[in-house]
Image: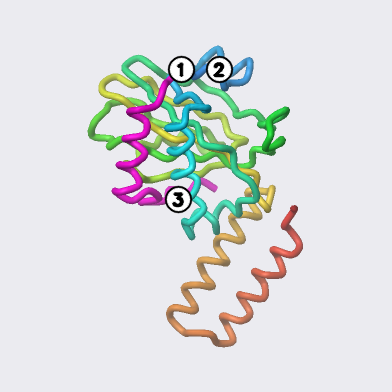
């Protein structure tokens, strides 16, 4: 399941993150890529130990975890500290798959990457190119979302960032280990959660709502891994 979520960062939070990134130190983005992805990665990332980077990453993390749609679609158990990246003219990230496990040897410990997340921090009208392109059996889908919007998609996919041809693409990127490993099961749970809330809004807490709530809860009991 690929899901786009509007306004994860409101105007105030977005402005704060952008101001922090203006103060942060940036370095070669290839330092955080796997050995094969490093061959096709060309961008700049905010230094992870920079205090401004840490504060910006905390704002993005808090906004994602506070978002009801994100929690329902992704079922986060653990999340990597977001990487904050800039892509200038000519910079790109070629086709790659994300590392299956991240954080080995780090204080936070290893994390299985079930879901990849990109939060867009620049208005798409201010740059050209730089689309996130995700491959799936039906073909390719490309995304250039509004500033403050996010996209979450299976980390198992091949994907790339097209070269920026004008302006600057600015994003926060992170990975999530989900309570529910299987993306098909996550989609079923998300659909049930959506239906449950819609029934409640239209009919209140009646027999139909209770049956949906029961099925949703019992599937969670079967599928959740902690």
Which residue is tagged 1? 27
Question: Residue 41 location, x and y as percent?
Answer: 50, 17
Q: Disc 1 and disc 2: Cα gap in Å?
A: 8 Å
Closer to the camera in the image, 105 or 118: 105
Residue placed under numbered mark 2 in the picture = 31
Tag 3: Cα neighbours inside 10 Å, few (<14), some, or many (≥20)?
some
Q: Residue at x 60, y 54 (%)?
A: 75
The answer to whether any part of residue 149 appears in the image is: yes
Question: 10 Å neighbourhood of mark 2: few (<14), some, or many (≥20)?
Answer: few
Task: Tell me what residue is drawn at x 62 percent, y 54 percent.
Answer: 186
Is 29 in front, or is 124? 29
Q: Position of residue 170 (x, y in %)?
A: 36, 30
User: Marks 2/3: CA distance?
Assistant: 26 Å
Q: Quadrant of residue 79?
A: top right
Is 12 covered by the magenta stretch? yes
CB within 8 Å, label 1 to label 2: yes
Within 10 Å of the Cα at label 1, are there few (<14), some (14-19), or many (20+) other Cα atoms?
A: some
Q: Which residues are magenta?
A: 1-28
Q: Is residue 196 left or right of residue 214?
A: left
Quarter of the rendering containing residue 15 = top left
Query: Which residue sits at x=56%, y=60%?
Result: 190
- From the image, tell me which residue sits under label 3: 63
Q: Relative to residue 31, is residue 26 drawn left or right?
A: left
The quarter holding residue 119 reads: top left
Seen from the viewer's position, the closer of residues 65 and 95 is: 65
Looking at the image, residue 1 sits to the left or right of residue 112; the answer is left
């Amino acid at each position: 399941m690929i899901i786009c979520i509007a306004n994860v960062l409101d105007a105030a939070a977005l402005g704060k993150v952008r101001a922090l990134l203006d103060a942060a130190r940036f370095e070669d983005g290839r330092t955080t890529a796997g050995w094969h992805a490093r061959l096709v990665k060309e961008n700049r990332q905010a230094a992870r130990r920079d205090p401004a980077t840490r504060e910006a990453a905390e704002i993005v993390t808090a906004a994602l975890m506070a978002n009801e749609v994100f929690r329902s679609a992704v079922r986060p158990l653990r999340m990597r500290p977001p990487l904050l990246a800039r892509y200038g003219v000519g910079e790109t990230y070629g086709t790659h798959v994300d590392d299956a496990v991240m954080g080995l040897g780090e204080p936070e410990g290893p994390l299985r990457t079930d879901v990849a997340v990109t939060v867009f921090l620049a208005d798409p009208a201010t740059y050209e190119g730089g689309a996130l392109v995700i491959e799936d059996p039906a073909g390719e889908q490309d995304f250039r979302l509004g500033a403050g919007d996010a996209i979450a998609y299976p980390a198992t996919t091949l994907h790339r960032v097209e070269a920026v041809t004008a302006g600057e693409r600015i994003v926060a990127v992170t990975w999530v280990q989900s309570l529910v490993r299987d993306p098909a099961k996550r989609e079923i749970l998300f659909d049930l959660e959506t239906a449950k809330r819609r029934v409640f809004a239209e009919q209140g807490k009646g027999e139909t709502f209770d049956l949906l709530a029961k099925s949703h809860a019992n599937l969670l009991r079967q599928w959740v891994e902690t």
